[in-house]
Image: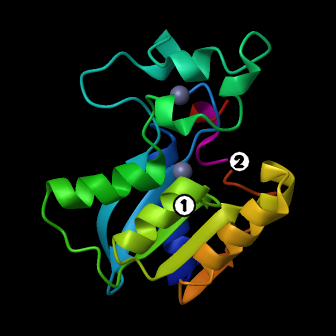
Amino acid sequence: MARPDKRLYFLLIALAARTRADCLGRRVGAVIVRDDRVLSTGYNGTPFGMPNCSEGGCHRCLHRGEEAPYLRGGAYDVCLCVHAEQNAILTAARFGQQTLGAGLTSTTQPCFGCLKEMLQAGISEVRYLHPWDPQEAYGDPALAAQYAALRSRFSVFEQVGDPAADTPGLFAPFLS
Ligand SMILES: [Zn+2]
Ligand SMILES: [Zn+2]
């Protein structure tokens, strides 16, 4: 019997959370843990009571293609969707769970915005399944350097699990 270690166990929980994601962009799940206990989970999508992203609820996600290139790969300030990591932090806040000294595991390497919010929420350990290259994503060495400075503030910032595997069997019906 294969038994996952703690890092993989929390990744599996983040992957389970991801099945609930509703966003036309990349679907992401996250979990916040402290002292090896789950404090909260999150997945990306529009806020409570707002139309879902997949129903056209987010103007930015719906039009980030050819017609409005300025909305692509950024413009998060006008994106209605709350990121998985943000939702995990905000759910902890909503129910009064302390995030100071906690760890966060996400199915995707956190974006610039989520990273700064995690830092400010006192999260000290960050783990993720799917990596991406800030230099490639931002195309600006200064921004990549700023991302690197942010990530250096965490005691742990590491990739976990096998991105190629990504639970193909268990969650297949929910992952398109
Ligand atoms: Zn969206
Ligand atoms: Zn984010």
Q: Nearer the viewer, residue 119 or 93?
A: 119
Determine the secondary structure under disc 2. loop
Q: Quadrant of residue 63?
A: top right
Q: Is residue 31 magenta?
A: no
Image position of 130 (left or right of 8): right
For the point 70% across and 37% down, the residue is 73
For the point 49% across and 36% down, the residue is 77
Q: Seen from this angle, which residue lies furthest left?
A: 96
Image position of 162 (left or right of 127): right
Query: Where is residue 44 drawn, in percent x and y?
Result: 47, 40
For residue 106, which numbered disc appears in the image?
1
Image position of 105 (left or right of 64): left
- What segment carries the magenta color? 169-173
Type of the residue with mark 1: Ser
Q: Is residue 171 magenta?
A: yes
**Which residue does the numbered mark 2 point to in the structure image?**
168
Type of the residue with mark 2: Pro
For the point 67% across and 63% down, the residue is 129
Image position of 18 (left or right of 175): left
- Estimate the spatial distance between the alpha carbons at disc 1 and disc 2, rounded to whole Å: 17 Å
Query: Where is residue 67 drawn, in percent x and y?
Result: 75, 9
Count of marks placed on residues:
2
The N terminus lies in quadrant = bottom right
Query: Where is residue 47 drawn, in percent x and y?
Result: 32, 31
